[in-house]
Image: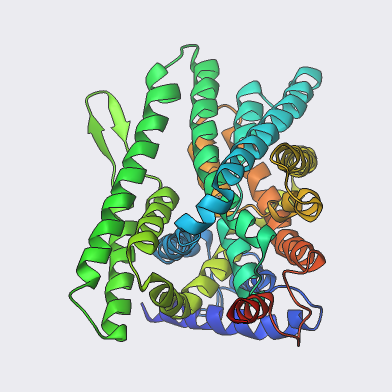
C-alpha cells in the first residue's frame, strides 16, 4: 500500500512539473500528463524496478483501474452538464445529426480501407479484425477534449457543439461496436447471434440511460436536505462514486447478458441533474475543482498503460498508420459533410473534425473486448499504437482549432468564457 501511495504522489508531482515544461512550447497540460505517464511507466523509469519510482509493471498500472474508472465517471458527469435544455434547443438536432453521421462515416471509411487491405494482403489482417477496427475508429476521447476546454476556458459555438457531439459520439460508437463485434464473432465462429448483434447493444443503452436518469433525479432529491456548500459538494461526489460503482454491475436475464456503459450512465446522471437542479452550475464548478488531481492521475496512468513494445512490431506499425490515416480522414470529412448538411458556420465546418481526433480509454476498452477474436492481439496493438499517437498529438490539434476560431484566447489574455460572460452582463 505504501508503494502505491508513493507512486500516485510521484505521478501527480511528475505530471504537474512536466506541465510547466510543456507550457514553454505552448502545449496543453494533458500532453504533459501523458508524457509523464510514459516516463514513469514500466518501459522507462519503471523498468529500473525501484519501489515507488514509477510503475514497475503493467499489472501494477492495471491495479489502479479504480482510479481511472472513477475519473472517467466524473468526466462523463461533467460532460452531461453540457446537455442543458437551452443549449439543446439552440443546437440539439444539429448536434445529434453531426454526432451520428460523422461516427458512421468514419466507421464506413475505415472498414472499406481495412477490408481492401485484407483482400490484398490476407496474411496481414483478418476480416473480423478489419470490421471491428472500423467500429472502434468511431470513438472519441471525451477526457482529453474536456481537459483542453477546461485548461484554456474555451467557450463559443464550436466548443459547445464539440462537447455535445463528443457525448453523442460515445453512444453511437457503443452501438456501432456492439453490432460490428457481433458480425465479427459470427464470421469467426460461423454463426450469427441476433442477441449479440441487435438485442444486447440496445438493452445496454436503454439500461444505461435509465440508471443515469434515476441517479440524476435521486441526486437532486438528496441535495435538498443539505444547505451548506461543502455538504452539497460532498453528496454530489458520493453520488458520482455510487453511480460509477453501479455502472460496473453485470447480470443475466434469461439468455440476454445485461450491463451498463459507465460513460452513458454518468453522462445521463449529469444531464438530468443539471436540468432539474437550480444550483447545478455552482455545484458542478465546485466538483470540478475537487476532481482536478483525480483527472491528472487519470492521464498519467493512461500514459503508463501504453505498451511501447508495439513500436517494434512492423505489422502493427503498418496497420496502425493506415488506421490512423483512414480514421483521421473519416473524422474530418465526416464532420465536414454533416456540418454542411446542418448549415453550420464555415469556422465550425473546417475545424470540428480536427477536434474529434483524440482517442483513448473508450477505444482501449473496445479493443480489450475484441481480444477474443481472430487477430484479437493485432486489434489491441493497433489501437494502442493509435492511442499513443492521438493522445500525444490530438490535444494540441484541438487547442489550435479552438484558438483558430477565437474560442481560446492567446495565453496572458482574457479567456473566451470570461469575455462572453462580460458581454452578456453588458
Q: In which quarter of the image is the C terminus?
A: bottom right
Q: Which residue is drawn at 33% across and 72% down?
A: 237
Give the farthest residue toward the left: 225
310 up-or-down from 60: above or below: above
Give the farthest residue toward the top: 190
Give the farthest residue toward the front: 426
Q: In which quarter of the image is the N terminus?
A: bottom left
Q: Position of residue 366 (x, y in %)?
A: 52, 41
Q: Where is residue 336 in the image (x, y as percent from the top left)?
A: 77, 42
Q: Residue at x 71, y 73 (%)?
A: 28
395 up-or-down from 128: above or below: below
Q: Can residue 53 be seen in this view?
A: no
Q: Where is residue 271 in the image (x, y as percent from the top left)?
A: 41, 56
210 or 176: which is nearer to us?
A: 210
122 up-or-down from 214: above or below: above
Residue 323 placement: quadrant: top right
Q: Which residue is drawn at 46% across and 58% down?
A: 84
Q: Is residue 65 visible?
A: yes
Left or right of 66 on screen, residue 163:
right
Q: Where is residue 281 in the image (x, y as percent from the top left)?
A: 43, 72
87 or 263: which is nearer to us?
A: 87
Amino acid at each position: 500500500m505504501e508503494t502505491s501511495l508513493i507512486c500516485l504522489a510521484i505521478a501527480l508531482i511528475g505530471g504537474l512539473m512536466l506541465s510547466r515544461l510543456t507550457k514553454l512550447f505552448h502545449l496543453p497540460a494533458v500532453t504533459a500528463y501523458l508524457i509523464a505517464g510514459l516516463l514513469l511507466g514500466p518501459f522507462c523509469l519503471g523498468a529500473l524496478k525501484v519501489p515507488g519510482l514509477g510503475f514497475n509493471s503493467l499489472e501494477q498500472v492495471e491495479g489502479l483501474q479504480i482510479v481511472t474508472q472513477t475519473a472517467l465517471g466524473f468526466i462523463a458527469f461533467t460532460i452531461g452538464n453540457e446537455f442543458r435544455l437551452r443549449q439543446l434547443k439552440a443546437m440539439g438536432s444539429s448536434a445529434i445529426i453531426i454526432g451520428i453521421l460523422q461516427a458512421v462515416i468514419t466507421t464506413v471509411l475505415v472498414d472499406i480501407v481495412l477490408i481492401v487491405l485484407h483482400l490484398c494482403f490476407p496474411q496481414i489482417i483478418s476480416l473480423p479484425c478489419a470490421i471491428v477496427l472500423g467500429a472502434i475508429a468511431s470513438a472519441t476521447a471525451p477526457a482529453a477534449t474536456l481537459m483542453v476546454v477546461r485548461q484554456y476556458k474555451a467557450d463559443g459555438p464550436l466548443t459547445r457543439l464539440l462537447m455535445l457531439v463528443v457525448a453523442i459520439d460515445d453512444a453511437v460508437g457503443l452501438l456501432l461496436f456492439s453490432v460490428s463485434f457481433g458480425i465479427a464473432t459470427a464470421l469467426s465462429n460461423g454463426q450469427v447471434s441476433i442477441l449479440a448483434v441487435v438485442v444486447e447493444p440496445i438493452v445496454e443503452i436503454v439500461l444505461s440511460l435509465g440508471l443515469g436518469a434515476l441517479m440524476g433525479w435521486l441526486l437532486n432529491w438528496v441535495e435538498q436536505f443539505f444547505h451548506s456548500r461543502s455538504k452539497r459538494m460532498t453528496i454530489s461526489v458520493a453520488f458520482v462514486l455510487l453511480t460509477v460503482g453501479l455502472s460496473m454491475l453485470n447480470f443475466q436475464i434469461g439468455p440476454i447478458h445485461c450491463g451498463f456503459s459507465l460513460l452513458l450512465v454518468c453522462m445521463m446522471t449529469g444531464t438530468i441533474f443539471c436540468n432539474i437542479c437550480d444550483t447545478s452550475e455552482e455545484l458542478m464548478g465546485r466538483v470540478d475543482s475537487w476532481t482536478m488531481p483525480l483527472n491528472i492521475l487519470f492521464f498519467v496512468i493512461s500514459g503508463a498503460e501504453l505498451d511501447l513494445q508495439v513500436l517494434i512490431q512492423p505489422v502493427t506499425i503498418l496497420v496502425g498508420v493506415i488506421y490512423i490515416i483512414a480514421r483521421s480522414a473519416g473524422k474530418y470529412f465526416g464532420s465536414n459533410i454533416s456540418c454542411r448538411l446542418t448549415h453550420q458556420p464555415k469556422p465550425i465546418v473546417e475545424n470540428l473534425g480536427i477536434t474529434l481526433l483524440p482517442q483513448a480509454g473508450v477505444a482501449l476498452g473496445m479493443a480489450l473486448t475484441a481480444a477474443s477474436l481472430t487477430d484479437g492481439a493485432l486489434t489491441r496493438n493497433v489501437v494502442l499504437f493509435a492511442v499513443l499517437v492521438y493522445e500525444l498529438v490530438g490535444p494540441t490539434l484541438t487547442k489550435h482549432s479552438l484558438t483558430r476560431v477565437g474560442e481560446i484566447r492567446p495565453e496572458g489574455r482574457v479567456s473566451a468564457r470570461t469575455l462572453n460572460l462580460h458581454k452578456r452582463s453588458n
